[in-house]
Every structure is written in C-alpha cells, then in structure tokens.
Image (cartoon, rainbow, N blue to C red):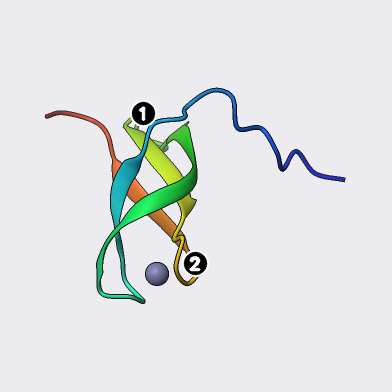
Amino acid sequence: MSIKSKNKQGGQMVQAYCVKCKQTVEMKDGKETKTVRGTRMMKGKCPKCGITVCRMMGKK
Ligand SMILES: [Zn+2]
C-alpha cells in the first residue's frame, strides 16, 4: 500500500529539468522535501518519461 493519490496539497505546477528528456518539464506529484543541508527542494516525476526530477527551492 502506498499513499499514491495525495493530490490535495501542492497542486501547483513546478518546472524541473528532466535529464532524460533533456528539457524542462512540469513536475508531476511534486513534493517538498529537504536536503541534509536544510535546503528546500521539490521532488517529483517527469510526466513524459516518469523518472524522478527535482528542483531546488532555496533562494530566488
Ligand atoms: Zn522526462
């Protein structure tokens, strides 16, 4: 069992670079997470090929 359909929070589209498609894509199932350094980042999946993509959210 997994928490798959948790689509309520974070309905925003976040763009991330997919290394497989070699282009910027709109992240699917994006979730905010933190690195060991405490930097915020979004982690999700590429809607086209399904690999994990992530994006740093730290500073603008
Ligand atoms: Zn991709």
Sequence-earlier tag: 2 or 1:
1
Could you classify mark 2 by the number of other residues whose Cα lies within 10 Å: few (under 14), some (14-19), or many (20 or more)? Answer: some
Q: Position of residue 8 (x, y in %)?
A: 59, 24
Give the number of marks.
Answer: 2
Return the mark for residue 51.
2
Q: Position of residue 5 (x, y in %)?
A: 70, 38
In which quarter of the view is residue 56 placed?
A: top left
Amino acid at the residue labelled 1: Gly
Real-space Cα distance between discs 2 and 1? 24 Å
Quadrant where the C terminus sits is: top left
- Image point (72%, 43%), residue name: 4
Q: Is residue 8 left or right of residue 39?
A: right
Q: Residue furthest right?
A: 1
Return the mark for residue 38.
1
In which quarter of the view is residue 34 placed?
A: top left
Q: Is mark 2 within 8 Å of ligand 1?
A: yes
Q: Is residue 28 above or below residue 3?
A: below
Q: Is residue 59 left or right of residue 33?
A: left
Q: Is mark 1 within 8 Å of ligand 1?
A: no
